[in-house]
Image (cartoon, helix red, strand yellow):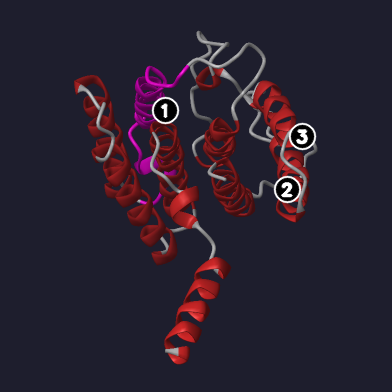
Amino acid sequence: MIRKSVLQYLFVCCIALLPFPALANVPTEELQLQSMQVNACRALASLMLLRGEGFQDTHAKQLKADLAALDVAVKGYAKADDGLKKAYQELVTQLHNGTTYGPKEDDLPWSYSKDLSRSLRDFLGEIERFVPPSKAGELPLWELPARVEYISVQYLGRVYLGGLEIAREQPQAYLGQDESTLIPVIDQGIGKLPPGAASDKLRTRWGYLSAALRDMNSKSNALVSVSGRPWAPIIVERHSREMASQLMQISQQ
């Protein structure tokens, strides 16, 4: 009897020491929307790395994983309607097309950059129809990861494709914003993170990442950074991905 009581006590203690990811990772509609936006941008970034860095196996595997995560997110969203599904299929088609063209820039059809840009904007725009309105001037924490990935994909597009077209006719939406608007928005969101070691590390990472993103020079036709320093697409993509993942974890707590 005593042995049984001791075992029960040890079991309860072990349970109490475990983290509670199930409570932190409850699949809400906001997190599903977040996952679709983030993985769409990541898939585009992975495609550009794949093409721009010589079709390396590492980037091919990353693209495959991003597409699988995006597929799960879209198919798991109960409210997905015909408009969202159609935009998703077009995005996947454009991403697939990008893997079939030759490795050189001249191998791409002249309209591919525009087609790829449009497919991402259309898909993200369809998702935005389901995003709950937020208070004026206040961006919910769960929406920050998509902004980070979106500005990152703009950076990679600048490096590898000469630029991606954003929805400049929608300046109030993040789809129509470049680094001059998105970076201050993210700055503000990062500044509101709860205190703690995880937030401190994230702020440090954002300090380095935002410096590179501010150097993008997207409003210029000249494909050079503001500072004249070389582009750093691999570093920017990696830090953006890690930062967005950290923000996603914090937003679920």
- Amino acid on which the number 3 mark rests in the picture: Gly
Which secondary structure type mostly characterizes the magenta part of the structure? helix
Residue 200 is left or right of residue 31, and the answer is: right
Question: Mark 2: which amino acid?
Answer: Ser
Q: Residue at x 76, y 51 (%)?
A: 196
Q: Which residue is mark 3?
A: 191
Q: What whole-number distance in Å separates the C-alpha atoms at marks 2 and 1?
A: 32 Å
**Residue 87 is drawn in which quadrant?**
top left
Residue 215 visible in image: no
Q: Tell me the crowding category of disc 2: few under 14, some 14 to 19, or many 20 or more residues within 10 angstroms, Cα based.
A: some
Residue 229 on image: x %, y %: 76, 45
Q: Which badge, 2 or 3, is on the more N-terminal residue?
A: 3
Residue 10 located left or right of residue 68: right
Residue with the mark numbered 2:
199
Q: Quadrant of residue 86?
A: top left
Q: Amino acid at mark 1?
A: Ser
**Label 2: element kind:** helix
Q: Position of residue 93 (x, y in %)?
A: 24, 37
Q: Is label 1 in a helix, a strand or a loop?
A: helix
Q: Residue at x 63, y 51 (%)?
A: 239
Residue under the point 42% across and 63% down: 56
Which residue, as the protein is rendered here, is positioned at the far top? 169
Residue lying at 54% horizontally and 39% vertically, measured from the top left:
149
Q: Is residue 81 left or right of residue 215?
A: left
Q: Which one is closest to the eye, mark 2 or mark 1?
A: 2
The residue range painted magenta reads 103-132
For label 1, the residue is 117
Say which label, 1 or 3, has the lower sequence index: 1
Indicate the position of residue 28 as horizontal and vertical percent values: 40, 36
Q: Depth check: 2 or 44 in front? A: 2
**Nearer to us in this view, 231 or 151:** 151
